[in-house]
Structures are given as structure tokens and as C-alpha cells.
Image: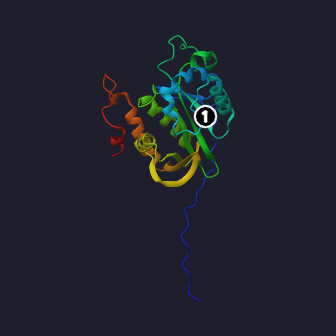
């Protein structure tokens, strides 16, 4: 009997499982701070994402839109205790009152009511798989005040950096409805690689959803990180806040 060539197999993967994200984590950036989402954030966020003028924000989300603040509070209460997804509030640093914290304040001295009023969006980690070291970012709800700003990019940078560098994941996923053109553009802009389309993947709000899959893997992260940090550098913006170079240019 002729010798059979061995089948190709994947590389050996060493190391420990990744850590699960915690809602107790606080991710601090120049423009935004991410903290665990709480029902106490509901009243401040609701005006930004409710009403007929904002109904389109929910077109590709699994929940919403919300026409009743009480229902929205109940939704955030459920998100507050969820273990997968793990939700975070995106707080604006620029909206912090100058008197809310002094140089001698500790975390315990922070005015929580003031902090809650600074929420301008939310996002989550989901499909959390520490064994395979794979995690997804999603359920991203940016208020119009946050969209298309350096703060929006920084929020995604902070979450990606935390997943790769603090928690130890090797695969970071982004998925969206294939019809959601802004989300697909955002994934590519941030440095994700398109992996393909899952046809008839889900039924969301009674409608078909084909899902576009994107990812960044750990050996790509250093280059993606460098580009994000270079783009976010204040030197990349002029006196009017206009970018000097596009994010994609920093990866060329």
C-alpha cells in the first residue's frame, strides 16, 4: 500500500484562555470614557435616540425603536445584568463639568449623577468565547452627537485595544446586516477585513437578514492600532477640527 501524505493541519496554539470582559472595567480615552451600562443612563440617553427623527437609528438593531421611556429603562435594566453581551455606556469627556473632579479627587469622589448625564452612546462585547479567544463588538448605538466624530472612532479603538491587549483575544469580530452600508464602511475604515456573507442568516423584526462578517486578528492588530493612534493624535487635526489625513492612509 502506497504511503499516504499527511493531511495539512493548523499551527499549534499556545497560551491560556482569554479573560471575559467585565462591566466593572473603565476604559478612558481623550474624548470618551466607557463604563458598564446601567439603567441610570437611560434618562440621559433617551432624548438622543428616541422620537420619529431618530427611528432610523434602530433599523438594523435587534431591538427598538423605543417610544416609551419606561420600556427603554426596562431594556437597559436587562442589558445591565447581561453576561453576553456585556454592555458599556459611552460617556463624553468634553461634556464633563469642570467642577465634577479636581486633581485630588479619587474615583469614589466622582459625581455619578453628572457622569450618567454624559452618555452619548452604547456598545457591547458579544459572542464571547474565551476558549477559542474570539469576541465580537456589536450592538453599537451612536447618538447623532457621537456619529462621525473622533470620539466615535476612539470608542472603537478603546474596545479593540482592551480585547486584544488586556483580555487576550486573538480574533475580534464585526458583523452587520448586509444592507447596512454605513456599518460596512465603518468596519473597513477601522481596519477590519471582510470575510464573507452569511445568506439568510437571521430573521430580525420579521425581516430577512444576510449578515456581513468582518474581523481583525491578533497579528494584524499592531498595524491597525498604530493607524488608529496616529489618526486620533491631535496633530492630525487642524484648528477647525478637520482631519489632515484619513484613517485609511495611515495603513498604506
Q: Nearer the viewer, residue 191 or 195?
A: 195
Residue bearing mark 1: 87
Number of numbered markers: 1
Q: Residue furthest bottom?
A: 1
Q: In the figure, residue 122 lies in which quadrant?
A: top right
Q: With 213 as the anchor, is 108 left or right in this view?
A: right
* Label 1 packing within 10 angstroms: few (<14), some (14-19), many (20+): many
Q: Is residue 100 visible?
A: yes
Residue shown at 67% from the left, 38% from the top: 83
Quadrant position of the N terminus in the picture: bottom right
Whole-percent x, y for residue 43 in the image: 60, 20
Element on which disc 1 rests: strand
Residue shown at 64% from the left, 32% from the top: 23
Whole-percent x, y for residue 13 in the image: 58, 57
Q: Nearer the viewer, residue 152 or 5?
A: 152
Q: Nearer the viewer, residue 180 or 157?
A: 180
Colour style of the rendered protein structure: rainbow
Whole-percent x, y for residue 73 in the image: 65, 25
- Residue 63 in the image: above or below residue 90: below
Q: In the figure, residue 147 lies in which quadrant?
A: top left
Whole-percent x, y for residue 158 in the image: 51, 35
Q: Is residue 168 visible?
A: no
Residue shown at 53% from the left, 10% from the top: 99
- Residue 180 in the image: above or below residue 29: below
Amino acid at each position: 500500500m502506497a504511503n499516504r501524505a499527511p493531511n495539512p493541519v493548523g499551527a499549534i496554539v499556545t497560551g491560556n484562555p482569554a479573560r471575559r470582559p467585565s462591566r466593572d472595567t473603565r476604559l478612558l480615552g481623550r474624548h470618551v470614557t466607557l463604563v458598564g451600562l446601567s439603567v441610570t443612563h437611560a434618562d440621559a440617553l433617551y432624548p438622543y435616540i428616541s422620537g420619529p427623527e431618530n427611528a432610523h437609528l434602530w433599523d438594523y438593531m435587534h431591538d427598538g425603536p423605543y417610544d416609551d421611556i419606561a420600556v427603554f429603562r426596562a431594556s437597559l435594566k436587562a442589558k445591565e445584568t447581561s453576561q453576553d453581551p456585556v454592555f458599556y455606556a459611552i460617556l463624553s469627556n468634553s461634556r464633563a463639568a469642570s467642577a465634577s473632579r479636581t486633581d485630588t479627587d479619587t474615583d469614589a469622589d466622582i459625581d455619578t449623577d453628572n457622569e450618567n448625564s454624559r452618555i452619548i452612546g452604547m456598545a457591547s462585547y458579544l459572542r464571547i468565547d474565551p476558549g477559542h479567544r474570539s469576541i465580537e463588538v456589536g450592538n453599537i448605538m451612536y447618538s447623532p452627537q457621537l456619529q462621525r466624530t473622533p470620539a466615535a472612532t476612539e470608542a472603537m479603538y478603546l474596545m479593540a485595544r482592551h480585547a486584544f491587549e488586556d483580555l487576550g483575544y486573538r480574533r475580534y469580530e464585526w458583523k452587520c446586516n448586509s444592507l447596512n452600508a454605513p456599518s460596512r464602511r465603518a468596519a473597513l475604515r477601522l481596519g477590519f477585513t471582510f470575510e464573507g456573507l452569511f445568506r439568510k442568516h437571521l430573521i430580525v423584526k420579521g425581516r430577512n437578514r444576510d449578515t456581513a462578517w468582518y474581523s481583525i486578528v491578533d497579528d494584524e492588530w499592531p498595524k491597525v492600532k498604530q493607524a488608529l493612534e496616529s489618526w486620533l493624535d491631535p496633530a492630525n487635526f487642524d484648528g477647525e477640527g478637520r482631519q489632515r489625513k484619513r484613517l485609511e492612509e495611515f495603513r498604506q
